[in-house]
Image (spheres, rainbow, N blue to C red):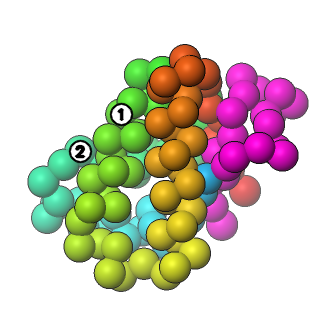
Amino acid sequence: MAIDFYFGNTIEEADYEGLHGALTEEVGELVYQNKDSLNFDVKLIIDLDPYGDTLLDIDKCKNLYDSISNVLNSGLVEEMSTEDFEGLEKLQTLLKIAIKTDRKVIGIGN
């Protein structure tokens, strides 16, 4: 289970062929289990619905970018699989582009 992120305003408009990133259930659980020992805000990561869809406006993209960057720079990466780490790196890149180009991102839970 994961939340896959794409450029787009809706599921129908999502750019499934372009750049995308993922937040896996394993990463979400890892962040949740360590939330009290982390010195940065992870509320947005924890609050994402893994079964629903979430539209991220520019402010949420910035907040999620900051949270993902902090996770990638923390000791949590040592506990992640290569696939989970690469999905977060791609998500970080997607969010960075979205912020620079003022695009929305849709997270699709599955």
Q: Position of residue 10 (x, y in %)?
A: 76, 27
The vertical placement of 29 against 102, above or below, is: below
Quadrant (top left, top right, bottom left, bottom right) of the N terminus: bottom right
Quadrant (top left, top right, bottom left, bottom right) of the C terminus: bottom right
The part of the chain drawn in magenta is 1-20
Q: Is residue 29 left or right of residue 71?
A: right
Q: Are marks 1 and 2 in contact (CB under 8 Å)?
A: yes
Q: Which label lies toward us, 1 or 2?
A: 1
Name the residue: 52% across, 46% down: 93
Q: Which residue has dot 2 on it?
A: 41
The one of 68 and 33 positioned closer to us in this rendering: 68
Q: Position of residue 11 (x, y in %)?
A: 80, 34
Kindly identify the amino acid type of the residue bearing the numbered disc 2.
Asp
Kindly identify the amino acid type of the residue bearing the numbered disc 1.
Asn
For marks 1 and 2 on the same chain, the one whose residue lies earlier in the sequence: 2
Q: Is residue 18 magenta?
A: yes
The residue at the far top in this view is 102
Name the residue: 48% across, 26% down: 99
**Badge 1 local density, few (<14 within 10 Å), some, or many (20+)?**
some
Mark 1, secondary structure of its residue: helix
Q: Is residue 57 magenta?
A: no
The vertical placement of 58 against 15, above or below, is: above
The one of 53 and 15 positioned closer to us in this rendering: 15
The one of 16 and 109 positioned closer to us in this rendering: 16
Quadrant in the picture for residue 53: top right
Q: Find residue 63 and name its label.
A: 1
**Badge 2 local density, few (<14 within 10 Å), some, or many (20+)?**
some
Q: Main secondary structure of the magenta part?
A: loop
Q: Position of residue 21 (x, y in %)?
A: 61, 53
Mark 2, secondary structure of its residue: loop
